[in-house]
Image (cartoon, coloured by chain):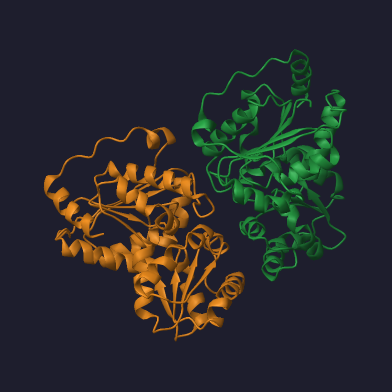
Chain colours: A orange, B green
Amino acid sequence: MGLPIGIFDSGLGGLTVVRAIRRRLPNESVVYFGDTARVPYGIKSGDTIIRFAAEDCEFLGRYDPKFIIVACNTASAVALPSLSRRFRQPILGVIEPGARAAAEVCGDRPIGILGTEATISSGAYRRAIERRIPGATVIERACPLLVPLVEEGRRPDDPLVRLAVAEYLAPLQAADVGSVVLGCTHYPLLKEAFADVLGPDVALVDSAEAVADEVAYLLSSYRMLESSGDAVQRFFVSDNPDRFRDVGRRFLGEDLAHVTLVSQDEFLKAPKRMPAHAATRSAADRLEETL
Amino acid sequence: MGLPIGIFDSGLGGLTVVRAIRRRLPNESVVYFGDTARVPYGIKSGDTIIRFAAEDCEFLGRYDPKFIIVACNTASAVALPSLSRRFRQPILGVIEPGARAAAEVCGDRPIGILGTEATISSGAYRRAIERRIPGATVIERACPLLVPLVEEGRRPDDPLVRLAVAEYLAPLQAADVGSVVLGCTHYPLLKEAFADVLGPDVALVDSAEAVADEVAYLLSSYRMLESSGDAVQRFFVSDNPDRFRDVGRRFLGEDLAHVTLVSQDEFLKAPKRMPAHAATRSAADRLEETL
């Protein structure tokens, strides 16, 4: 087994990223941390989100990941620059890949962004798109109900889901958007509801798939892909592993083996120094410089 | 200014309890702690909820409260026995007063309970009602969407609110309930939606009002009521005081003065020993014995 890809999220939403990574890169091992004791991040302040995200990264660091993915849109939007300064590993968020995919497929029409309160108010997607398409029209909409709708187990054809999705999408439709970013890892579970309202002329961008494509490209460029097939997935949570296993199954698309509860004392204890893997470090350092 | 009543909640929902206390007991000072860095408690494990609630109580202890109200239904359901063993002050949760009020007004019909996932799965309301009415029929329903609907600022006549409330109430109506407990401090903001669906034959129990009545009764019994009119309200939060002020206004029914952010370091530091107020302690000890 090679060095794993580390992935963290405020809770279980990031399992849609694990699912996309497993499809795209089946030989890669994954170590996942879900901060279920402090979920959700989307309504918290920037300072708090940065602190939580740094603690999550430090925890993953114990497993010597060759690459860290911030699967939480909120943490990507708010904490990524700070994390990249602080940690040695290359760190990729979900915002840049999602913004890039949306810019590529919008066909000169405005771009719609859906996300949590904190993601939208950060303006991170807007900035990432405007760097690619100066003067682009970006229509943003915070959708606070969609995460609880998904976590309650509601499906795309549920009447409450239909009503909420139609309401949130209305201003995007009025602006005639050409692509819409599902800027929260929970939203792909309601993809059919968005597609039904928007119709075939609007491209839906799933950030989880966009980040998996980006990771595949980066690891391949730096010859850091695993070739053998003994990949292992390990999941760690800061609370409630039973709920994580139950609800997480729908996000991952299969049963979760190896879910481990990390106590607060264990979580916050001083991190070990990372083991030195000279060869990998060297590749990782080169990779980091490009991000 | 006399010793304050301490009130804590996982976030801002407990402000409906502050509002009820202010109406019922206008001379009482209040010190409130909202754990907005770790909100919500409703999807967390029992062990975590107990730990968080104990830390919240310890923080309030620094302000020498004569009485502590656990305004969070989830924490009341899960943590109250542990808190009562651990702290000197009399501690009252919202479950017992709500259950008592529901039992009094149900008219021999079944009793309905609405709450968060953790409150409902704890069975605390069911047990509290069955102690009063052995063999009572209790219909419980977790309503995970209602808190985000309220926090998004939606009103009782919003189409999504109507649809969600109608769906959650359906099994209670089918059972012909005589009273329904709004077992979450957010729900009173949607009271009209519940009343419209249930009609005038079903009594709605607002836990916030029930707990204010109970506190008034207990303080009055032990002659611990304040008689002067210089009451002060102070609010402390563990994150995002701006959002607390903005959204909290709707819960409190007026502007919030004196909202202070407590940093994590400040929050978790070793608590000071409580000042000794011999007279008050003596009354408080007698009061504690009756709870």
Instruction: Tell me where residue B162 sits by quadrant.
Output: bottom right
At 79% from the left and 27% from the top, the residue drawn is: B1
Q: Quick one: A44 or A194, which is closer to the camera?
A: A44
Q: Report x, y in % for residue B148.
A: 62, 58
Would you identify the image quadrant in which residue A61 lies? top left
**Residue closest to the eye, A63 or A128:** A128
Q: Does B196 appear above or below B205? A: below
Q: Classify residue B232 by image quadrant.
A: top right
Q: Nearer the viewer, residue A54 or B95?
A: A54
Placement of A240 over or under B80, stated as above or below: below
Is B216 or B100 nearer to us in this picture? Answer: B216
Percent across and percent down for residue B204 are 81, 53
Which residue shows up at 22% across the image and 67% down it? Answer: A217
Residue B123 in sight in this render: no
Relative to residue A263, is residue A53 depicted above or below? below
Q: Is residue B111 left or right of residue A88?
A: right
Q: How many marks?
A: 0
Looking at this rendering, what residue extends furthest in the left direction? A279
* Residue for point 72% across, 40% down: B94
**In which quadrant will I find the C terminus of chain A?**
bottom left
Give coordinates of residue B110: x percent, y percent. Answer: 79, 52
Q: Is residue A286 visible?
A: yes
